[in-house]
């Protein structure tokens, strides 16, 4: 019921605002220069299906979102929702236009960016991966825009010198460093044979010179008896760099086979309430998780929840929120705790343990 009350309040507020101030453009699905790039326009009034004939003024907040749908999948829509929710919360006139470049090829990125430039956008959220950086550096349309990259870290963009770029990816390295502060003995790692798993494996190996067990987990395998009963795991601190379902099975089998390991540690990758339902409480007794997501305004969190956007556990959505807050206010408000310095978001790392039904912050002495 509280969701209904909140939604009605939002609807009343922004319907009134729209009738008084907004122009509603028709939602547009145009193609760009023989590419498959889709364009959609959103304003507060178009979201709530209101109509009037007033133009958005120059000083109104306008932002473009570009994403390669074949690469980032569902994150494109959740990024748009994160931005919409934030701007609705701010109660300001705004226009958002989304551009789907489909992939990270030079041609498609370039065509979409020149379309964005021709439409006069100066602020961009670009949901590209680090694989696109070599193309982006050669596209001049980016040069006079303020661009926020939620998925890219400053370290990955060391060869790009543009002062207009801001990088918002969390640091798995910093999370592992924080977790390893708890390790007082031997260290072991399980890592998944996937792009994210191999990336985390590399980070862990750079931080830990002597790894007692360094075990690859195949994506096709869900029976880990031979792994969890390895005598070398005894009394080690185990880092599990595997995705949620695999991690849940590993936790269950570690407990079922009474493996006498020490701490079990994992990063943001598994900081998800679903792990609470996929495992028993006893499976998680030694589990410590790291997260870089800060608490935000409860009303903003609730509004985003109504838009089917999670910012408590989904770090991409949270990074997008940090970015839009910076582009909108330059972090002059206290809504978001993270600051941006030297073109990158500064994230803190918090450690958590699990109760039977939730996560609790671990207070270190």
Image: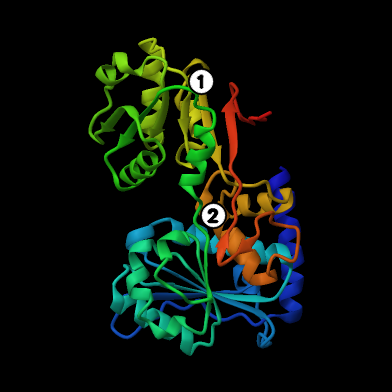
Residue 239 locus on image (x, y percent): 41, 31
323 relative to 243, above or below: below
How is colour applied across the structure in the image?
rainbow
Judge left or right: residue 31 versus residue 307.
left
Specify the label residue 286 is tagged with. Answer: 1
181 relative to 286, above or below: below
Whether residue 82 is visible to the viewer of this picture, yes or no, is no
Q: Nearer the viewer, mark 1 or mark 2?
A: 1
Residue ID at (66%, 67%): 87
Quarter of the figure with residue 160? bottom left
Q: Secondary structure at mark 1?
A: loop
Residue ID at (59%, 49%): 311
Q: Earlier in the sequence, mark 1 or mark 2?
A: 1
Judge left or right: residue 163 versus residue 22.
left
Whether residue 363 is visible to the viewer of this picture, yes or no, is yes
Q: Secondary structure at mark 2?
A: helix
Quarter of the figure with residue 317? bottom right
Q: CA distance from mark 1 to mark 2?
A: 29 Å
Are there few (<14), some (14-19), or many (20+) residues within 10 Å of tag 2? many
Residue ID at (60%, 23%): 355
Quarter of the C terminus within the rendering: top right
Q: Which residue is under mark 2?
A: 317
Quarter of the N terminus within the rendering: top right
Residue 79 locus on image (x, y percent): 51, 61
């Amino acid at each position: 019921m509280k969701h209904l009350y909140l939604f009605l309040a939002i609807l009343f507020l922004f319907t009134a605002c729209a009738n008084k101030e907004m122009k509603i453009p028709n939602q547009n699905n145009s193609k760009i220069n023989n590419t498959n790039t889709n364009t959609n326009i959103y304003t507060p009034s178009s979201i709530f299906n209101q109509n009037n004939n007033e133009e958005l003024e120059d000083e109104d907040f306008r932002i473009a979102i570009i994403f390669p749908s074949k690469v980032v999948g569902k994150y494109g829509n959740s990024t748009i929702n994160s931005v919409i929710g934030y701007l609705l919360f701010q109660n300001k006139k705004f226009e958002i236009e989304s551009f789907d470049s489909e992939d990270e090829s030079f041609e498609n990125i370039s065509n979409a960016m020149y379309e964005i430039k021709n439409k006069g956008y100066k602020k961009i959220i670009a949901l590209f991966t680090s694989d696109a950086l070599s193309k982006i550096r050669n596209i001049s349309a980016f040069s006079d825009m303020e661009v926020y990259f939620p998925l890219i870290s400053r370290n990955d963009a060391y060869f790009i010198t543009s002062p207009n770029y801001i990088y918002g990816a969390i640091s798995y390295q910093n999370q592992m460093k924080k977790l390893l502060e708890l390790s007082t003995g031997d260290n072991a790692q399980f890592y998944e044979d996937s792009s994210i798993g191999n990336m985390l494996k590399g980070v862990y190996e750079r931080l830990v010179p002597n790894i007692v067990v360094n075990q690859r987990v195949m994506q096709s395998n869900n029976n880990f008896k031979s792994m969890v009963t390895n005598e070398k795991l005894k009394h080690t601190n185990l880092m599990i760099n595997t995705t949620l379902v695999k991690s849940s099975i590993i936790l269950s089998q570690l407990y079922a086979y009474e493996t006498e390991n020490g701490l079990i540690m994992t990063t943001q990758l598994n900081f998800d309430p679903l792990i609470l339902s996929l495992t028993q409480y006893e499976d998680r007794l030694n589990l410590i998780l790291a997260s870089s997501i800060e608490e935000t305004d409860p009303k903003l969190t609730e509004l985003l929840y109504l838009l089917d956007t999670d910012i408590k556990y989904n770090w991409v959505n949270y990074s997008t929120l940090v970015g839009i807050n910076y582009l909108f206010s330059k972090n002059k408000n206290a809504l978001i705790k993270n600051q941006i310095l030297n073109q990158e978001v500064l994230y803190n790392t918090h450690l958590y343990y699990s109760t039977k039904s939730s996560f609790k912050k671990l207070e270190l002495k």
